[in-house]
Amino acid sequence: MAEIINIIKALAQENRLRILNLLKQQKLCVCELQNIMEEKQSNISRHLNVLKKAELIKSEKESFWIYYYLNEETINEHPFVSIILTYEIGETDFCQSDNERLKIYQESDLDCNDLKDSGISPDI
């Protein structure tokens, strides 16, 4: 299982907390995270790699996209992670903004094919 030091290091960065906050709500691919977070693809991919190495997230391929989701085994093994995800990061300003953009995305009929020209967030 994931070592606690790697988990703590993975949690010690704002964009990784933002990603975890979004993934606790639903599975998302890189292009969805990029659009919702208004960050560059390379930045998102780098942070996903750190979270995956810490075993905080998993991925699965669906069609052309790889979707990321929380690794419930690691979260259950380390209850402090669940506390952070449930009670701490969701209340931060940066996560509140992401949550608003995620809600707009969820209420739209858009998918990964449509995101670039969606207007949900500015082009990066």
Image (tube, rainbow, N blue to C red):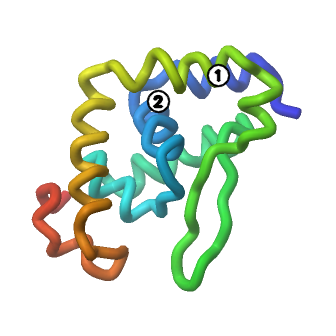
Residue 124 sits above or below residue 23 on the image: below
**Which structural element holds mark 2?**
helix
Asked whether, in this view, residue 60 is left or right of residue 37, the answer is: right
In the rendered structure, which amino acid carries the disc numbered 1? Val
Residue 118 sits above or below residue 78 on the image: below
Q: Residue at x 16, y 71 (%)?
A: 118
Q: Residue at x 53, y 57 (%)?
A: 27
Residue 81, which numbered label?
1
In the rendered structure, which amino acid carries the disc numbered 2? Leu
Residue 17, which numbered label?
2
Q: Residue at x 69, y 52 (%)?
A: 58
Using the numbered discs, state the Cα–Cα distance from disc 2 to disc 1 in whole angstroms: 11 Å
Asked whether, in this view, residue 124 is left or right of residue 70, the answer is: left
The quarter in which the C terminus is drawn is bottom left
> Is tag 2's residue or tag 1's residue first in the polypeptide sequence?
2
Q: Residue at x 22, y 35 (%)?
A: 97
| Closer-to-camera residue (105/33) | 105
Q: Position of residue 64 (x, y in %)?
A: 53, 83
Asked whether, in this view, residue 34 is left or right of residue 47, the answer is: left
